[in-house]
Image: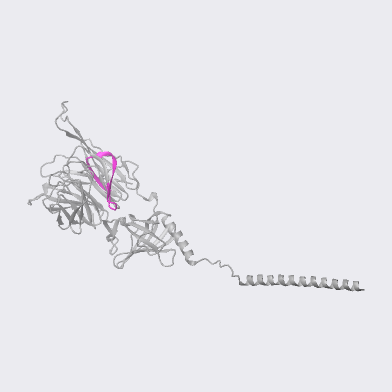
């Protein structure tokens, strides 16, 4: 009995122990669950919303990459509409609109306002008169230098951008629309599209076919140094020379300018009696005709109705067979400087046309005579010529002077030219000239002379592409059985005009008729 009771007590104790242990484990599990539930309740949910500033930065970067092609991208003006107090004018096809280029570069500009920015280089070509009263007045022969500025996004936009004087909207990779601030209250609404390789003027691949444009009566061409220029704004050709047989009652041989109007076919003459050398170069700055002579620079209106204003070099230089080129209000004079020793100079001078002042810009590797020049964008190109006045050893050099770096480099032409004449056609420079030949047996008796005599003067035309620095010689229908050659040249409206022929004997008081020939360049 005692044993049975003990068994019962032991069993009850064990059972209570088991129950107690089970209760303890249950309490522990419940406590852990409660703690886990509390932790789950306290833990915040993950925020998946993107930062608006990061989204904007990404969008702006995408536009910047497209605008610049991740590096650099060239755009052209495909549409341009001028609005001013006189009305609205569609100037999309103006020569001074189609020559513009806008280059967007993915490169930080020093004066940028935001982190998302780049550099805009605007190559304006010729100036646009935005306060014009007619569409004709908008067209100005006035070649301007490129300029750079920053472009930035406007505020919190990823499509609206601005640059000084220019606000624009990025539409897509092929279209930009914008507004350019002009003079006064005038504006120009423009549409930009990418400029492709095919949009650039191409080097002619077929022979140039020349025909007669007009006749130029003069006894001051061969042996002189006439200048020639074309005006896009007036659609005219100008020729200048020193015409000795038009002296009349005046003492000085007059400076004679002749204008040929391409629309009417009329020739207009203007005489200005001033004692100067025969060498003349012609340019147009802000629709004003500039005659760069041996001692003076004379400025005429394009209609040639009044006498010019005249400015002298004040004895700093005297020029003969010089070259020259213009950009903005500056005229760069190449070689031809006689100096105190009558030796041809190697200087390139800069004439500030606003202040009538002359300074030396740079020095060429060699002296040059008869070497003519052009400026395209920010570089000056000088072609051929000789080291001496009327020298016999022609040069095939192309001197290239960079206005930004102030560095002079040298390229070569396939042929050496004694005299060169140049004309600009957007990215191309047309180069014509004379290749002279000489003999030491002029009488043909088989006995060498002690001197050389010129016995040939062949015409030459080539083209230099400033985009790739390649020079191409062109074939033409020009013939030279009697030493006919080129004496001056002009380029306008995609056409080349040359003053062509050879010296002939004419009766006293009469003038020889020279041919001005024209050929299409494309």
Residue 35 image-quadrant placement: bottom right
Q: How many marks?
A: 0
In the displayed orientation, state which residue is furthest to the right: 1
- Which residue is drawn at the image coordinates 39% and 49% (left, top)? 197
Q: Position of residue 388 (x, y in %)?
A: 18, 41
What quarter of the picture does the N terminus occupy? Answer: bottom right
Which span is picked out in magenta? 400-423
**Taking 442 as reference, is 423 left or right?**
right
Query: In this rendering, does residue 490 appear at all?
Result: no
Which x, y percent locates residue 511? 14, 44
Q: Nearer the viewer, residue 416 or 202?
A: 416
Confirm whether the magenta stretch covers residue 378. no
Where is residue 93? Give x, y as percent.
34, 56
Q: Is residue 361 above or below residue 4?
A: above
Task: Tell me if residue 411 is in the magenta stretch.
Answer: yes
* Visual colour scheme: one colour
Q: Using the rendered image of the protein, determine whether residue 90 is visible from the camera's viewpoint.
A: yes
Q: Quadrant of residue 105?
A: bottom left
Q: Position of residue 116 (x, y in %)?
A: 42, 62
- Residue 258 sits above or below residue 189 on the image: above
**Which residue occupies the foreground of this view, 39 or 149?**
39
| In-image side of 8 versus 87 (left or right) | right
Query: In percent of the image, x 25 and y 37: which residue is there?
Result: 479
Magenta stretch secondary structure, dominant: strand
Residue lying furthest top: 446
């Amino acid at each position: 009995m005692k044993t049975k009771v003990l068994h019962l007590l032991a069993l009850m104790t064990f059972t209570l122990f088991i129950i107690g242990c089970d209760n303890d484990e249950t309490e522990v599990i419940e406590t852990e669950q409660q703690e886990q539930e509390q932790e789950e309740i306290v833990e915040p949910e993950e925020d998946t919303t993107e930062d608006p500033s990061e989204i904007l930065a990404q969008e702006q970067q995408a536009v910047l990459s497209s605008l610049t092609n991740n590096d650099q991208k060239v755009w052209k003006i495909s549409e341009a509409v001028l609005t001013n107090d006189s009305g609205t004018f569609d100037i999309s096809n103006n020569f001074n609109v189609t020559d513009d280029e806008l280059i967007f570069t993915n490169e930080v500009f020093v004066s940028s306002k935001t982190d998302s920015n780049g550099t805009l280089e605007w190559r304006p070509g010729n100036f646009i008169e935005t306060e014009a009263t007619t569409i004709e007045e908008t067209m100005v022969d006035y070649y301007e230098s490129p300029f750079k500025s920053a472009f930035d996004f406007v505020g919190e936009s990823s499509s609206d951008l601005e640059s000084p004087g220019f606000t624009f909207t990025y539409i897509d990779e092929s279209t930009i629309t914008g507004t350019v601030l002009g003079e006064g209250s005038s504006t120009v609404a423009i549409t930009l599209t990418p400029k492709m390789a095919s949009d650039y003027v191409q080097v002619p691949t077929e022979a140039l076919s020349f025909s007669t444009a007009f006749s130029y009566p003069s006894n001051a061409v061969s042996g002189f140094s006439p200048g020639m220029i074309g005006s896009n704004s007036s659609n005219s050709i100008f020729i200048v020379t020193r015409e000795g047989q038009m002296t009349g009652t005046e003492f000085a041989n007059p400076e004679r300018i002749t204008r040929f109007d391409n629309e009417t076919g009329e020739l207009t003459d203007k005489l200005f009696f001033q004692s100067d050398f025969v060498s003349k170069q012609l340019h147009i700055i802000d629709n004003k005709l500039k005659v760069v002579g041996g001692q003076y620079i004379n400025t005429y209106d394009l209609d040639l109705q009044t006498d010019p204003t005249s400015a002298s070099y004040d004895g700093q230089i005297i020029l003969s067979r010089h070259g020259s080129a213009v950009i903005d209000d500056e005229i760069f004079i190449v070689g031809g400087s006689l100096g105190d020793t009558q030796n041809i100079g190697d200087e390139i001078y800069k004439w500030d046309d606003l202040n009538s002042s002359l300074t030396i810009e740079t020095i060429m590797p060699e002296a040059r005579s008869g070497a003519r020049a052009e400026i395209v964008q920010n570089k000056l190109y000088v072609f051929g010529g000789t080291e001496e006045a009327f020298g016999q050893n022609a040069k095939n050099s192309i001197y290239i002077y960079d206005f930004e770096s102030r560095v002079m480099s040298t390229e070569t032409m396939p042929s050496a030219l004694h005299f060169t004449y140049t004309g600009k056609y957007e990215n191309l420079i047309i180069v014509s000239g004379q290749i002279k030949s000489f003999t030491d047996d002029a009488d043909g008796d088989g006995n060498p002379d002690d001197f050389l005599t010129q016995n040939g003067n062949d015409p030459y035309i080539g083209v230099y592409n400033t985009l790739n620095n390649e020079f191409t010689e062109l074939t033409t229908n020009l013939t030279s059985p009697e030493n006919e050659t080129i004496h001056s040249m002009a380029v306008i409206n995609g056409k080349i005009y040359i003053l062509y022929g050879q010296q002939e004997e004419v009766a006293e008081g009469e003038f020889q008729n020279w041919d001005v020939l024209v050929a299409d360049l494309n």
